[in-house]
Amino acid sequence: MIETVLGFYGKSPTAAARDVNDHAVSRELHRRKWSVFLSITFGYGFYYVCRLSFSVAKKPMADAGVFDASQMGLIGSALFFAYAFGKLTNGILADRVNVRRFMATGLLVSALANLLLGFTTVFWFFLVVWGINGWFQSFGAPSSVVSISHWFGGKERGSFYGMWSSSHNIGEAITFIGTAVVVSAFGWQWGFKAAGLACLVMCFIIWKFLYERPEVYGLPGVVHPHTTQQASQSIGQKQWAVFRNPYVWILALSSAFFYVTRYAVNSWGIFFLEAEKGYSTIEASSIVSTNAIAGILGTFFSGILSDKFFKGRRNLPALIFGVLYAMAIALFVWGPADPVMDTVSMVLFGLALGVLLVYLGGLMAVDICSKDASGTALGVVGVASYLGAGFQDILSGQLIEDAKVIVEGQSVYNFEAAGILWIGSAVVSLILAALVWNAKSPDD
């Protein structure tokens, strides 16, 4: 049984090399590269549809008395903690497996978990299944990054990494608009069911159009420059070098605080606007969705920006957008209940988040590690990032619940303490990122 599973996920053998100067071969390489890019971009976007369905359903579930804020914080953290450790282990695995099958499997199980949760209100069952969802969610990003490393090299890697990262925002926009409409029209249960059904379709698309590494098809692979020492090292040695790199851990910690603020908005932003500023579910979701839409621009152009204007360096743009990120979340939390002001804060937040998600969420760490250990570098950053997101969900839920008062039979929430947590985390992330300024890759 184990051998069958290992064989199923094992890498396909390398085919005989074909003549790269042949026009047909060149066209096939170009076609497969774009097929891979589009598959991981939209495929990982739909991973987010199955990850954020709970965020849209929170207020309707609280109003229906299904769970309170503390319980929802614990459920949300189960996904993040499972995702954190899954991203580390599955990041290591992604360097060694068939990424097409690996990525499709993760989305399949995530889709089934969402479908299942549309039929239950049992807290512990919800907690466990949402945690399982988190583990299989961690198949997506490492598979995508490894695919980028296999198919895109040189300066184009940063550009395509940035464009791929718009998948986060595509998924968020679909969720905050599409899932919100479904929940408002048919109830919170259908928010999970619709997400699951949509992701089943995308699972098939990944299976069909995501290709393994170029060498499997006899196409020329990406050539990464290696020092003599790097060339003689095994993948295991290169992965171990990632763990011994202190700059990777500083970036991981910076990303952890960045993710506190990121998922504060993703997990609680709609709830915050409904409970604190009096918006309806559709209004609140529409405002929060603007951060995802603006983030598409930030992620799409982040790699191009650093590659073309900063000669491949990410530090200065990370500093600039880090400041904007902290200012935007402060405006969102402390600003008045005004639709225009709240929308502006989310647009600025999304632009900054989109850029930082590329840099802090993986690319800066990938840049300073061997390209043969890209999945491992992403995994180290990922485990810290989602531990931060998980602790955020518990702390935010507890702070919100502790500050709740009952007035004439209605729950009234106070977000002052939670807001300080969200804003402060953005500032700490900015400071930590500034400490990594001159780190370089061993491949350079």
Image (spheres, rainbow, N blue to C red):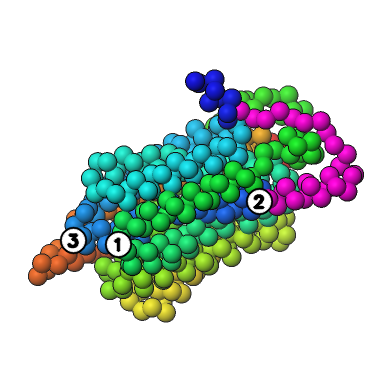
Circle 1: residue type: Gly
For the question of whether residue 181 can be seen, the reply is yes
Q: Is residue 83 left or right of residue 395?
A: right
User: What's the magenta region?
Assistant: 10-35
Residue 328: x and y in percent read 45, 67
User: In the image, is residue 13 part of the stretch drawn in magenta?
Assistant: yes
**Disc 3, disc 2: CB below 8 Å?**
no
Say which residue appears at 43% left-offset and 64% top-offset. Answer: 178
Q: In which quarter of the image is residue 298?
A: bottom right
3D distance between C-alphas at marks 3 and 2? 46 Å
Badge 2 local density, few (<14 within 10 Å), some, or many (20+)?
many
Circle 2: residue type: Phe
**Disc 3, disc 1: CB below 8 Å?**
no
> Residue under circle 3?
404
> Residue under circle 1?
187
Say which residue appears at 57% left-offset and 58% top-offset. Answer: 166
> Residue under circle 2?
37
Q: Which of marks 2 and 1 is in front?
A: 1
**Disc 2, disc 1: CB below 8 Å?**
no
Circle 3: residue type: Lys
